Amino acid sequence: MSGSGNVAVVPPEGGRRSLWRRHGTAALFLLPAVVLLAVWVVYPAIYTIVRSFFGKEGFDEFVGIDNYEALFTDDSLITAIKNNAIWVAVVPALVTAIGLIFAVLLERVRFSVAFKTAVFMPMAISAFAAGVIWRITLEDDPERGVVNAAITEVADAFDPPGTLQRALPSQRDALQGTPERGFTLRDPVEPGDVTPLGLTGIPPRSVPEDAEQAQRPPPQPGTIAGVVWRDFSPGGGKPGEVEPGEKGLPGVTVELRTPGGETRTAETDAKGVFRFADVQEGGDYRVGVGKKTFAQGSDGVSWLGEKLIVPSLLIAYIWIWAGFAMVVIGAGLSAMPRDVLEAARTEGANEWQIFRKITVPLLAPVLSVVFITMVINVLKVFDIVLSLAPGSVQDDATVIAVSMWRTSFGGVNDFGLGSAIAVFLFVLVIPVLALNIRRFRREQ
């Protein structure tokens, strides 16, 4: 006790020991996690921030904020930032909306379990594998890409392709033209003539399956006839003459141009024979193979080209995550009080009013969880871009995470700029994380 009357408080003996007993066990359990966080999170983060202020060669070259300036001056990095902005603007909203629609509609169908399983299935595979699947699906070649095969079938139903895709005249001095304009005999013909139209440069697989041995038709008065055939014999042969083993070309459109300017058409049969009957005497008639024969079919859509690669990536990513949104929103929907919905129906509200004014507001916390989760995911999207986008359009499809990897490990080996990109990506994620943490605290 001091002279001023103040009493000094002396901690009881063993106080420190009781403090250790109270918190020591928890500290021991937390120590491994703290060590791992320090080694795998804290140290790499600090190292990356420091490394971003140095050049490509290492810590010997201090460049200040030059790497951060390059973020907004390099064309490839600007494209990555723009693409990430498109991802953030499109994917979270669409995934949340699709998941909400699926969750609400599947409450009233019997096959909801099977449908949910099918929609959720893409979540069972990695995004890299999903990218490979979509890359095969969106192949430009309709014989390999499923999407373009379907587009081609529909387009060809309305605008059928020609019987032949390409050909050349076997006698260039007699038959002139190109597949784009058609081929026309140089010399005019008259009624009673038989006109041979030999074509070559036709692959065997392009010959129609119903083709038979070519046959030169006999002449008939008042008729212009002829034969269109594949004028090629493996062992040789004479151009312009129909020989054994040479097949006629069925379905070829042959045109007859009259002296009066009219054009008549006829199609060849299985032997390549065509006829124009009731041809008037007098005047010069021109015979040729019409360009319709060589009309190109639909080649589909270049989904993996520079113009559509970003929308293709967005579609593939939405396909993966729609199941996640559907399941989470469906769980929130099942926990929603049904008496509120029944009361609204009793008051005369229709289903659209119930959905807009009751279901969506009550699901707002769940919808925000899905939306924020998707924002974080698309900010760091990486593997699906790498697997789906071909190398020729990687610069057009790149995003921030891909640019960081390519800059650091893709052959450039500029770890200073790569670190700056990583820090920039981390800064973009911080506001979303802060918003998420604030929402968690508000719900507690």
Image (cartoon, rainbow, N blue to C red):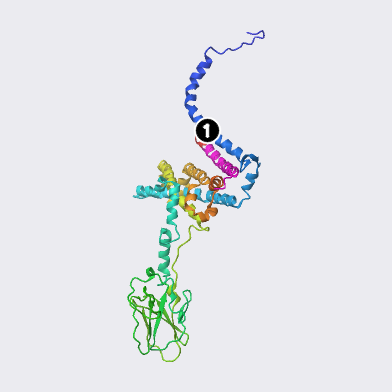
Residue 25 point in image, percent of width and height:
47, 22
Magenta stretch encompasses residue 435: yes
Q: Nearer the viewer, residue 392 or 112?
A: 392
Residue 53 point in image, percent of width and height:
63, 40
Classify mark 1: residues with Cα within 10 Å, few (<14), some (14-19) or many (20+): few
Q: Quadrant of the N terminus?
A: top right
Prevalent SS, magenta region: helix
Q: Nearer the viewer, residue 58 or 426?
A: 58
In the image, taking residue 85 as reference, residue 162 lies left or right, namely left
**Tag 1: residue type?**
Val
Residue 11 appears in which quarter of the rendering? top right
* Vertical placement of residue 426 versus 81, above or below: above
Residue 50 appears in which quarter of the rendering? top right
Tell me what residue is drawn at x 45 percent, y 60 percent: 140
Q: Nearer the viewer, residue 250 or 355?
A: 250
Magenta residues (range): 411-439
The answer to whether residue 429 shows anywhere in this view is: yes
